[in-house]
Amino acid sequence: MQSNHKIEATTLHVAFISCDYPPYVFGGIGVFSKEFAEALSSNDVETTVLAAHELNTASVETIHHNLRIIRIPTFSFPPRDLWWQTRNFNLIIRLLLKISPDIIHLNSGMCSLPLRAIEKRLKRPIVVTVHGDLKEIMKIALKYARVMQPYDFLMYVAAAPLHEMLLRADQESADCMVASAKHVKK
């Protein structure tokens, strides 16, 4: 039996949210973010990244036909990811509504504050990647406390309760949690 309905191939569209994305931010999460977005887009997944930068206006970079980076302003002082979410809470939601992705993927803590509003307004699957175990980070921070710079103390010791709160918010809204390593999964 032959159908008269034409079936068209559709492209999956993923919105990936990460405050840390090169070249403005380097480090483990930034490298993961870039490699993840490039891997998705090279596999014919339309990928839009919402990332931070220190300029005062948003900008859009088209890397190739499947990869677009929307850079959103932030402040450079810690905790940078919290200021980014707070400053751009409504803008992030408006951008997601406009691009209407099929899936929203984010790095834990990078969009936790607006996540409930995103969940309610977009009704799309939400995937969260968790990158670190705060207990392990605290052990390392305390081991090197004598040589720790004020920025390090603020990010790894003073902000630990904030990071735990953001992780709990992510767990409540996420449809799927991905651990970047076995010790993180535990």
Image (cartoon, rainbow, N blue to C red):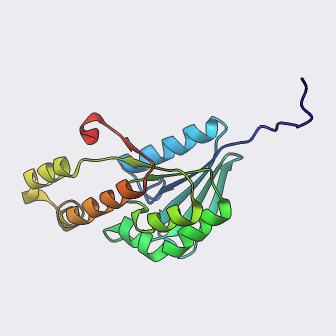
Horizontally, residue 66 falls left or right of residue 155, namely: right
For the C terminus, the image quarter is top left
Camera-nearest residue between 57 and 104: 104
Asked if residue 54 is positioned above or below residue 50 in the image, the reply reads below
Question: Number of labelled discs?
Answer: 0
- Which residue is outermost to the front? 1
At a point 44% along the width and 60% down the height, the residue shown is 19
- Which residue is outermost to the top? 1
Is residue 9 visible in the rendered image? The answer is: yes
Asked if residue 138 is positioned above or below residue 82 in the image, the reply reads above
In the rendering, at what x and y percent does residue 114 appear? 46, 68
Quarter occupied by residue 167: bottom left
At a point 45% along the width and 76% down the height, the residue shown is 87
At a point 31% along the width and 58% down the height, the residue shown is 168
In the rendering, at what x and y percent does residue 55 appear? 51, 72
In the rendering, at what x and y percent does residue 119 appear? 51, 61
Quarter occupied by residue 95: bottom right
